[in-house]
Structure formats: C-alpha cells, structure tokens
Image (spheres, helix red, strand yellow):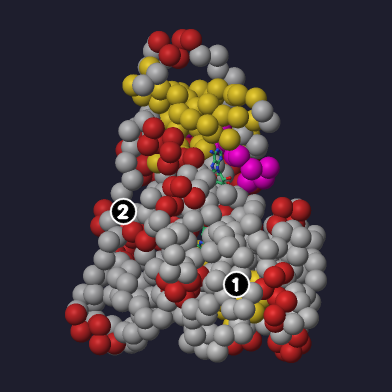
C-alpha cells in the first residue's frame, strides 16, 4: 500500500517530527526503522502492513497520517470506533492557534511566536481561583507549539478546513494567553453533526463553529492522499522485535471479536486521545474521581480508555507533565450543565436523530439559571451556593493591565475561590471516595420558568437519572440510581 501520486523519500525521525508538528495535537512516535530480520517478526502472521501505523483518527491521528504520507510513507490508520473523529468531531471546533496567523494579520492582531511562548510560560499568571495555568508548561513543547502554531493554521486551511470568516477571538477555550486573541473557528459547513445526525441550517453553515468542520475535511484529505482507515479496530497492544525487548514492529488489534496483527515497517503513532474515561487510571491522579463521574465529555460516542498510555507504559514509557489531570480549570472541569441524564455535557445535547442517541438515551435538561434548582449530594445535603457561579480560566485580556512575568499581575486578577467541584466531591463525611451523584431538586414552577419537558427523551427515568414525586417527602424514596451508594435519608429535607 503506497500513498497515491507520491515519491517515497528517505525520512528520518527528526524530519518526521518536524513535519508532523504541522499537525494538531501530541504525537507519540514509538519507533522508526525496524529490523526486518528480527526473530519475533519472523514468527508473527501479519494480517496487514504499512510504513506508518496511526492508532486513533482524531485531532492528532488524522494530521499525523497526512504528515506521514507527505513525508513519503504509506499509512494505515486504525480506529476503535465505528466512525472517525474521536472527541475532536464532537468538539466546538474552536482551534487555538496564533503567533501571527494569516487571520490575525488580516485583522491587525499583533502576535508572534515569541509572544505566544511568553504568554504560555508566564509563571505570574494565575486563574481566578489561584491556580497557575502556565507555570508547569513544558518549555520545549511550548516553544515548538509557538513556532509551529501559525504554520499549523495555514496547514489546516491547505488541507481543506474552512474557518469562520471573522477575527480571532477568545471564545471556546481557556489558557490561550493574555496578549492576543487566538481562537479560530472551524466552520460546520454541510457535514451532518454527530449530535443531531443533521447539518446545521444552511444559513449558519459558514458561521457555526464545530468539530465536524475540522475532522471531515482532514479525513477527506487523508483518504484522498492514500491513507487507509480501518474502523472498528481497537489496538490491544504493541508488538516488539522480541517479546519484552527491541523496537516496535507492529500492533495487535481486535476487530469484531477477531485478533489482527498489523506490521508497521517504520513506526507506530499512538493518537488514542486520553485517559479520563478509565476510572482506575484517572484515580492515579485524583482518588476522588470514582465511577459515578460517568458522563465524561464526549461519552458515549468516544471513551478515553487510556489504551494508548497503557500500551506505552507496558514497553517502558513514563508519564510526565500531567498537571492537566489535577489542575482545576474553572468551568472546564465542571462542564456538565445538563441534568436528568447520564451524559450531561452542556454542549452535547444528544438528539433522537443522532446516530449516538441509542447509547446516550436522553437529551437532558439545560439549566439556564442555577438558582432554579437546589443542588444536594447523595446524602441530600446542600454543598454549594447556587448564586455564585464558577471561577473562569485565563484567556485573552483576562488580566487587565497585564505585565508579562510580573508579580504585580496578581493585583489585577479577580480572585474567586468558589469551587463547585471540590464541594461536590467532598462527599458525605464517610470513609468513601467520591461524592456520589449530585441531585438537582426543583419544583414544577421551575419547570415552567426553564421551559423544560420532564419526560423522555428529555430525561432518563429508566436508568434513574431523573425521579419525580408529588411531594418532597416522597421524592427521596424515588431516587434510585446505580451510583447512589446509600438510599437518600427519607427525612433529610424535613430537618430545619
Ligand atoms: C464535547 C467536546 C467539545 C470540545 N471542544 C473543543 C474545542 O472547541 N476546542 C478545542 O481545542 N478542544 C475541544 N475539545 C477537546 C478536543 O476535542 C480534544 O482535545 C482533541 O480531540 C484531542 O485529540 P486526540 O487526537 O488526542 O483525541 P481524539 O480526538 O479523542 O481522538 C482519539 C481517537 O483514538 C481512538 N482510539 C482510542 N483508543 C483506541 C485504540 N485502542 N485503538 C484504536 N483507536 C483508539 C478514539 O476512538 C478516537 O477516535 C472538546 C472535547 C469534547 C469532548
């Protein structure tokens, strides 16, 4: 399998990393240049092969596949899901790239790689809860990101991504640096949205930011250039020259109950997305994150099961720079904003017309004003003042009178230590981890004011993510959910 219309060229690991830096996301290149005569390679029955094997077809995998083809390699992408895109295809399509993009120049935004680097490594910047966003950023990685940020923006355009025709702004992501607007927005165009199964209305296709507008053009580019994409193939592990040593020579995958061995003649790129859907894995970093936190953004379409990390650890890799796992990024970490359903990510209202709806089961209720509900933990106890909102993360112009790397910035940061998440996960004072389900209690007046429909497909009664009763006394008895470790005390709301 050779890429179409391309002359293979000799490319080194360094060249490849330089080229693939034009892609989006983090790429882990596990090995290049294998020894074809190795003992293990001789004995394995290979079902397929390619120069470069990419595991995962999301925001990292597709650009990596294209970059590898452009470097002269034949490429095979394997994807566990029944469609490509991972989290990225569900995303808001907000693409944080700056450092002097053509879009920034067009709108007279002053930015440069040095300014971007300075912003993203500035120790003096903290979030409004005191968390230092940029202090732990790896300087070499940020330097590479800063230098490649504008070229990556142009690279995406060259590979078919259409951006909404407006100036970069600060909408859709945090921690992109204080000095310049750097958010660009991939236009949804006419691609059917995963959330609805339908395209957005024709008049909004060029102005709506959506991950579908990032992923479908990249998928089309990769396929056109000759990448083969095998769907429903889940990598189970890496294969080395010898059972426990030597270079990576391929992977083993499962596909519809069968084991498939795929040989990678030059390298394997792990682009599997992440680990937050793997309860044991995430609890290495925060023991409070037990199984009841089950509506991780992107589920149930894409589960970040740590398979890439675990495969790499199994051959001796380590994890580092993971402050992301414990950093409390304002609203980013408390995103569920939809109640009455399991998969309550605020920006993913799964509609019955979506191909994912059969897994998601319900749309959920979007809460416009949190003062319409009273939040209680699994013991029925209030833990949070619904009037106070959340702290926010840093972004363009978040700090007025910003002076790079000056301790004086602290005086210009609005301090807001309120933390919904810590309060929720504090639990009930018993010797159990995790806080259990969070229940939003409301009455029929709130239903009217919020304009909710409290029946399926809007709420999930069957699996116990929504319960109703005529009286508040009856309600505690109707709360039955697999994550509710103990029944709600029947008299909890009678107490003064
Ligand atoms: C709802 C939502 C909105 C978001 N909005 C934004 C936004 O607007 N802007 C932004 O910058 N970020 C956004 N993000 C985050 C962004 O989508 C991710 O950071 C990005 O997609 C990560 O890219 P990735 O390639 O590492 O992982 P993914 O895009 O998730 O791709 C990983 C792929 O690997 C596959 N895979 C996993 N394990 C295996 C295996 N063992 N074998 C084979 N395949 C495997 C997965 O199925 C998946 O397709 C959003 C995320 C979500 C969920």
Classify residue 102 as left or right of residue 146: right
Closer-to-camera residue (314/477):
477
Look at the picture and state if 143 lies above or below 173: above
Look at the picture and state if 34 lies above or below 445: above
* Magenta segment: 72-84
Res. 378 image quadrant? bottom right
User: Of the residues tagged 2 and 1, which is closer to the observer?
Assistant: 1
Quadrant location of the N terminus? top right
Residue 321 disc label: 2
The CA distance from mark 2 to mark 1 is: 43 Å
Where residue 82 sits: x, y (%)? 68, 42
Residue 6 disc label: none
Quadrant location of the C terminus? bottom right
Q: Residue at x 34, y 21 (%)?
A: 245
Classify residue 198 as left or right of residue 381: right
Closer-to-camera residue (136/27):
136
Does residue 48 appear in the picture of this structure?
A: no
Residue 489 disc label: 1
Closer-to-camera residue (430/208):
430
Q: How many marks can you see?
A: 2
């Amino acid at each position: 399998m050779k890429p179409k219309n391309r002359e293979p060229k000799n490319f080194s690991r360094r060249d490849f990393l330089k080229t693939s830096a034009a892609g989006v996301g983090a790429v882990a290149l596990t090995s290049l240049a294998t020894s074809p005569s190795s003992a293990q390679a001789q004995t394995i029955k290979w079902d397929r092969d390619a120069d470069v094997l990419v595991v995962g077809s999301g925001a990292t995998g597709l650009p990596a596949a294209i970059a590898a083809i452009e470097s002269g390699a034949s490429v095979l992408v394997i994807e566990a899901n029944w469609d490509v895109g991972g989290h990225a295809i569900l995303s808001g399509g907000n693409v944080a790239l700056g450092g002097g993009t053509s879009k920034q120049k067009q709108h007279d935004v002053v930015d440069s790689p040095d300014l971007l680097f300075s912003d993203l490594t500035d120790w003096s910047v903290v979030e409004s809860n005191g968390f230092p966003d940029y202090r732990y950023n790896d300087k070499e990685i940020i330097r590479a990101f800063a230098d490649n940020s504008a070229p990556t923006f142009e690279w995406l355009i060259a590979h078919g991504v259409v951006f909404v025709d407006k100036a970069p702004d600060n909408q859709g992501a945090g921690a992109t640096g204080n000095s310049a607007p750097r958010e660009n927005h991939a236009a949804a165009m006419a691609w059917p949205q995963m959330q609805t199964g339908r395209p957005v209305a024709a008049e909004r296709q060029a102005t709506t930011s959506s991950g579908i507008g990032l992923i479908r053009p990249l998928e089309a580019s990769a396929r056109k250039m000759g990448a083969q994409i095998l769907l429903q193939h889940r990598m189970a592990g890496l294969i080395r020259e010898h059972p426990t040593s030597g270079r990576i020579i391929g992977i083993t995958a499962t596909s519809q109950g069968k084991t498939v061995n795929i040989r990678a003649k030059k390298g394997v790129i792990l682009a599997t997305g992440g680990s937050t859907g793997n309860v044991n894995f995430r609890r290495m970093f925060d023991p409070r994150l037990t199984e009841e936190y089950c509506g991780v953004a992107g589920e149930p379409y894409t589960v970040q099961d740590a398979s890439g990390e675990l495969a790499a650890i199994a051959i001796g890799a380590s994890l580092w720079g993971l402050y992301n796992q414990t950093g409390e990024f304002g609203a980013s970490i408390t995103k569920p904003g939809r109640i009455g359903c399991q998969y309550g990510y605020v920006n993913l209202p799964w509609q019955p017309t979506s191909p994912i709806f059969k897994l998601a089961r319900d749309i959920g209720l979007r809460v416009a004003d949190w003062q319409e509900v009273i939040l209680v933990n699994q013991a029925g106890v209030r833990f949070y003042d619904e009037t106070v909102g959340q702290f926010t993360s840093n972004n363009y112009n978040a700090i007025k009178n910003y002076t790079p790397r000056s301790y004086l910035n602290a005086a210009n940061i609005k301090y807001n230590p309120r933390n919904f998440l810590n309060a929720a996960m504090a639990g009930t004072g018993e010797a159990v981890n995790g806080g259990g389900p969070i229940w939003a209690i409301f009455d029929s007046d709130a239903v009217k004011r919020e304009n909710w429909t409290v029946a399926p497909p809007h709420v999930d009664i069957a699996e116990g993510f929504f319960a109703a009763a005529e009286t508040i006394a009856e309600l505690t008895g109707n709360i039955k959910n697999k994550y509710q470790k103990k029944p709600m005390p029947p008299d909890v709301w009678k107490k003064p």
